């Protein structure tokens, strides 16, 4: 079982408010474990592409975008 990850170093450019339901402890843990597994599988499948994307972004010249996000 994983522990919750830390905060991202760069916040997302869009703020989304989610109204999450109250869950009992067991359901919260099962949901958390499912989401971790989903992220792990996504990373395993697309991790090389994600690394390639960020490597390409580092090679681009700076933009006028103050937080230097690609979008």
Image: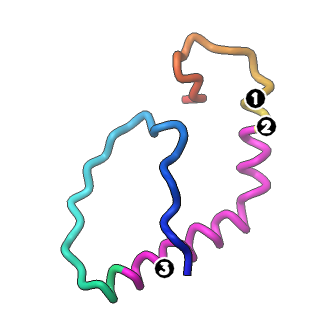
Label 1 secondary element: helix
Q: Picture quarter containing residue 55?
A: top right
- In the drawing, what numbered circle is on residue 34? 3
Mark 2 lies on residue: 55
Residue 22 sits above or below residue 15 on the image: below
Q: Residue at x 26, y 56 (%)?
A: 18
Q: Quadrant of the N terminus?
A: bottom right
Q: Residue at x 72, y 66 (%)?
A: 45
Query: Where does residue 10 sit, x and y in percent of width and height?
Result: 52, 37
Q: Are marks 3 and 2 in contact (CB under 8 Å)?
A: no
Residue 45 falls within the magenta-colored stretch: yes
Query: Where does residue 46 sit, x and y in percent of width and height?
Result: 71, 60
Residue 40 sits above or below residue 29 on the image: above
Label 1: few (<14), some (14–19) or many (≥20) C-alpha neighbours in 10 Å = few
Q: Residue at x 19, y 74 (%)?
A: 22
Label 2 secondary element: helix
Secondary structure character of the magenta stretch overall:
helix
Q: Which residues are magenta?
A: 29-54
Mark 1 lies on residue: 58
Query: Where does residue 13 sit, x and y in percent of width and height?
Result: 43, 34
Q: Are marks 2 and 1 in contact (CB under 8 Å)?
A: yes
**Foreground of the two, 12 or 28:** 28
**Foreground of the two, 6 or 51:** 6
Q: Residue at x 57, y 76 (%)?
A: 37
Q: Give the left or right position of residue 20, taking residue 38 as reference.
A: left
């Amino acid at each position: 079982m994983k522990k919750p990850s830390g905060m991202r170093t760069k916040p997302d450019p869009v703020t989304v408010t989610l109204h999450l339901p109250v869950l009992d402890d067991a359901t919260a843990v099962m949901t958390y474990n499912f989401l971790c597994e989903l992220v792990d599988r996504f990373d395993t499948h697309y991790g090389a592409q994600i690394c390639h994307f960020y490597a390409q972004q580092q090679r681009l010249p700076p933009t006028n975008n103050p937080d230097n996000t690609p979008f």
